[in-house]
């Protein structure tokens, strides 16, 4: 297990240290990691492995590093390392000639390490550590081309929004610690907690998920994250990092109460709708895929919110494959177009309005898009269809008022998915070439094609089960489409084909202008930017006001006060203290004079005092 | 008792003499006051002699006192003469060199 976990980390380190051999080292370590994961999966399938190592002591509490590998973790390990391996091979060609080549591979390795960490850990605190590491590596990878201003801004935005979600995560961590006394998940989830705290903890941890998995309202970083290299998008924003949120949700699922689940489901619903609607109207190829990812994640979260854990996990896995395939294929298109334009970059290689008719020139990409897209759209005989079926069936058997609403939403989203997938393929590959007519586009190298095709093959139904219509296979265990639900399957198949038909009608011939409201994802992103700007301005004004009026005035006041005190002290010193001294002197002088007067030089006075004293003495003596 | 009135008289004379000594501004008057005190003391002695029996101790004592008084008066006058020569005045207020 350690090999699977640590090999990518080793890859990161050695690539950093020996940049010359970057490709071979990184790919080699990744292959080692994948094989180790595969071996681990095969040997420990259906068992749960626990490893506990002491970590540190805080006061009287001893915190441990816990690792728990169950089936789900094994699957994730294999999938993550596999997709990462494909991306490594792919990037050897895609990123060739890039100045940050070694750094890129190092961060890829580091990212994979962090992701594997999330998958195998059983301790919430350790998971948070890896969570942050994943966030950091995604920041580094999105902003890989750091000389480009937009890339840096996008990376910062991604990290910031992640961080906002992590506030919720931290609060959730604290609540868990307080109520359960431990961070270890297997222990923490086995005690009951009072309902209010449980909902609070669940929702706070869900906050972290919202940030990481680009749910509403913290989703605006995902479209901008397309500034990174396409293989990065394939790895991070399709298959793994955004899936980390869903995976966390699955792990802490027992923690969720009814109310929390409703919140989760509604969030997923909103996200998937926004994503699908926005994906319909984008011009940038990668953004279509980004919004599509957001929409699919919304579906997964929705399913989790309705209690469909296995279905969501299945969809997570299938989505990982077909989305990565789509991104890599998109990368082929972009790379080919960019290459063909050299040395003058006349048009945006990512804008679909410039593309068209590429099926003749880039057949591999076309095939990959067809397979991956079909899986995304949920066409039968593909893995996406099976995972969507799993979710739908489970929702149907749930049969509550909310689940009917959710079924409607899922059906609408899948309708929209078909539409935008068809639009995407139609605009890029079908029809006649538009601006690309002017350049000579030729097929890309094998190094890029093979990983894409491998992943496309993984989008077929075989990955899930032998029967193309039955999703119960080695990935998914609970339930399958029984006779009651068979007509649901039939309906969904018909639904998909209806959508295809409609799509062909709409998008077949022309490229319609898209709605700007949808294109900008309801201007939520713009709203956030404006809000942040406003906040900064207000902040500036408040602090400058405070500084000038309050702080400076306070200082002046203190100074004046000091001077007044000084004056008072002087007065007191002069009049009172000296007065006392003078008074004492005067009293002493008067007393002295009085006493002295007995000794005045007058003889008769002496006689008088002497006789006086004698008389007194006599009177006293005779008494 | 009728003899006690002599004692009272002697006391009165003594107080008067004291008063003269203390108040008068002339040194000779001071001497006069002293003489008066002597006489008062003599009167006292004779008065007690009369009270206390047939022996004449008091009278004899008074004789001695007279003699002493004469000597003392002589000495006193001599002193005043010397002082007068030194200070050119006979007012005791002027003799204040011992003033503290």
Image (cartoon, rainbow, N blue to C red):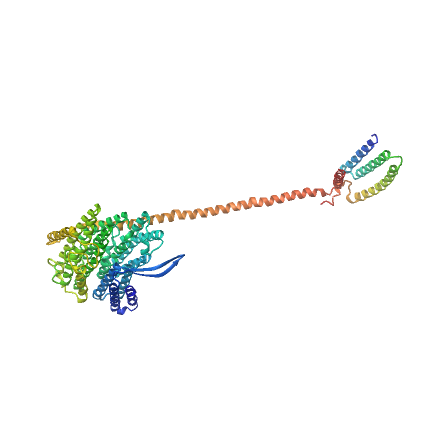
What is the tally of numbered marks visible in this picture?
0
B10 with respect to A476 (left or right): right
Determine if residue A95 is in view: no
Measured from the top left, where is residue A539 in percent x and y?
33, 49
Determine if residue A39 is in view: yes
Res B40 → quadrant: top right
B23 with respect to A480 (left or right): right
Point 84% across, 36% down: residue: B45
Measured from the top left, where is residue A538 in percent x and y?
32, 48
Q: Is residue A427 above or below residue A564?
A: below
Measured from the top left, where is residue A259 in percent x and y?
27, 47
Name the one closer to the observer, A36 or B67: A36
A120 with respect to A486 (left or right): right
Measured from the top left, where is residue A609 in percent x and y?
74, 40
- Residue sitting at the far front: A483
- Residue sitting at the far right: B55
Is the C terminus of chain A in the top left, top right, bottom left or bottom right quadrant? Answer: top right
Name the one closer to the observer, A43 or A390: A43
Name the one closer to the observer, A233 or A608: A233
Is the N terminus of chain A in the top left, top right, bottom left or bottom right quadrant? Answer: bottom left
Name the one closer to the observer, A211 or A178: A178
């Amino acid at each position: 297990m350690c090999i699977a976990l640590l090999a990518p980390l080793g890859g990161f380190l050695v690539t950093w240290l020996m940049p010359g051999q970057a490709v071979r080292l990184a790919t080699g370590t990744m292959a080692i990691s994948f094989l180790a994961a595969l071996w681990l999966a095969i040997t420990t399938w259906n068992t749960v492995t626990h490893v506990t190592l002491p970590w540190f002591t805080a006061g009287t509490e001893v915190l441990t590093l816990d690792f728990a590998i169950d089936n789900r973790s094994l699957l994730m390990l294999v999938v993550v390392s596999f997709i990462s391996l494909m991306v490594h091979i792919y990037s050897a060609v895609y990123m060739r000639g890039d100045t940050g080549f070694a750094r890129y591979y190092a961060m890829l390795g580091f990212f994979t390490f962090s992701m594997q960490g999330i998958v195998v850990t059983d301790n919430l605190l350790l998971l948070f550590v890896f969570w942050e590491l994943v966030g950091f590596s995604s920041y580094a990878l999105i902003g890989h081309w750091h000389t480009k201003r937009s890339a840096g801004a996008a990376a910062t935005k991604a990290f910031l929004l992640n961080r906002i979600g992590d506030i919720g995560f931290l609060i959730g961590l604290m609540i868990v610690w307080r109520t359960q006394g431990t961070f270890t998940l297997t222990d923490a989830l086995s005690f009951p907690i009072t309902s209010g705290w449980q909902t609070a903890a669940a929702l706070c941890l869900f906050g972290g998920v919202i940030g990481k998995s680009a749910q509403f309202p913290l989703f605006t970083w995902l479209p901008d994250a397309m500034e990174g290299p396409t293989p990065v998008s394939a790895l991070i924003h399709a298959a793994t990092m955004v899936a980390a949120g869903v995976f966390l949700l699955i792990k802490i699922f027992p923690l969720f109460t009814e109310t929390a689940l409703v919140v989760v489901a509604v969030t997923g619903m909103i996200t998937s709708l926004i994503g699908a609607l926005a994906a319909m109207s984008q011009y940038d190829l990668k953004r279509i895929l980004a919004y599509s990812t957001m929409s699919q994640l919304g579906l997964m979260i929705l399913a989790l919110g309705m209690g469909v854990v296995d279905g969501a996990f299945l969809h997570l896995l299938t989505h990982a494959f077909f989305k990565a395939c789509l991104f890599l294929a998109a990368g082929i298109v972009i790379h080919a177009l960019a290459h063909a334009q050299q040395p003058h970059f006349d048009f945006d290689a990512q804008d679909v309005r410039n593309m068209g008719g590429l099926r003749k020139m880039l057949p591999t990409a076309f095939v990959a898009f067809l397979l991956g897209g079909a899986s995304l759209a949920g066409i039968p005989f593909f893995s996406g269809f099976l995972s969507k079926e799993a979710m739908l069936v489970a929702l149907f058997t749930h049969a509550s008022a909310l689940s009917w609403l959710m079924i409607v939403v899922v059906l609408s989203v899948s309708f929209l998915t078909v539409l935008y997938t068809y639009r995407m393929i139609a605009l890029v590959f079908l029809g006649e070439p538009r601006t690309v007519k002017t350049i000579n586009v030729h097929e890309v190298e094998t190094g890029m094609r093979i990983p894409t095709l491998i992943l496309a093959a993984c989008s077929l139904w075989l990955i899930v089960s032998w029967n193309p219509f039955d999703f119960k296979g080695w990935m998914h265990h609970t339930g399958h489409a029984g006779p009651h639900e068979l007509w649901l399957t039939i309906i969904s198949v018909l639904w998909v084909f209806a959508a295809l038909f409609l799509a062909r009608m709409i998008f077949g011939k022309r490229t319609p202008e898209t709605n700007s409201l949808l294109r900008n994802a309801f201007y939520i992103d713009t709203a956030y930017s404006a809000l942040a700007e406003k906040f900064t301005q207000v902040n500036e004004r408040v602090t400058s006001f405070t500084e000038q009026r309050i702080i400076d005035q306070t200082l002046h006041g203190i100074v004046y006060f000091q001077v007044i005190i000084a004056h008072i002290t002087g007065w007191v010193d002069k009049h009172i203290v000296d007065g006392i001294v003078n008074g004492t002197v005067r009293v002493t002088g008067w007393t002295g004079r009085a006493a002295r007067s007995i000794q005045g030089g007058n003889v008769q006075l002496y006689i008088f005092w002497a006789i006086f004293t004698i008389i007194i003495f006599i009177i006293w003596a005779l008494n | 008792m009728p003899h006690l009135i002599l004692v009272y008289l002697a006391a009165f004379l003594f107080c008067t003499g004291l008063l003269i000594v203390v108040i008068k501004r002339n040194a000779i008057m001071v001497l006069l006051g002293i003489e008066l005190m002597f006489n008062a003391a003599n009167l006292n002695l004779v008065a007690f002699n009369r009270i206390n029996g047939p022996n004449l101790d008091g009278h004899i004592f008074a004789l001695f006192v007279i003699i002493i008084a004469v000597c003392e008066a002589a000495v006193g006058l001599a002193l005043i003469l010397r002082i007068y020569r030194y200070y050119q005045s006979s007012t005791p207020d002027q003799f204040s060199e011992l003033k503290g």
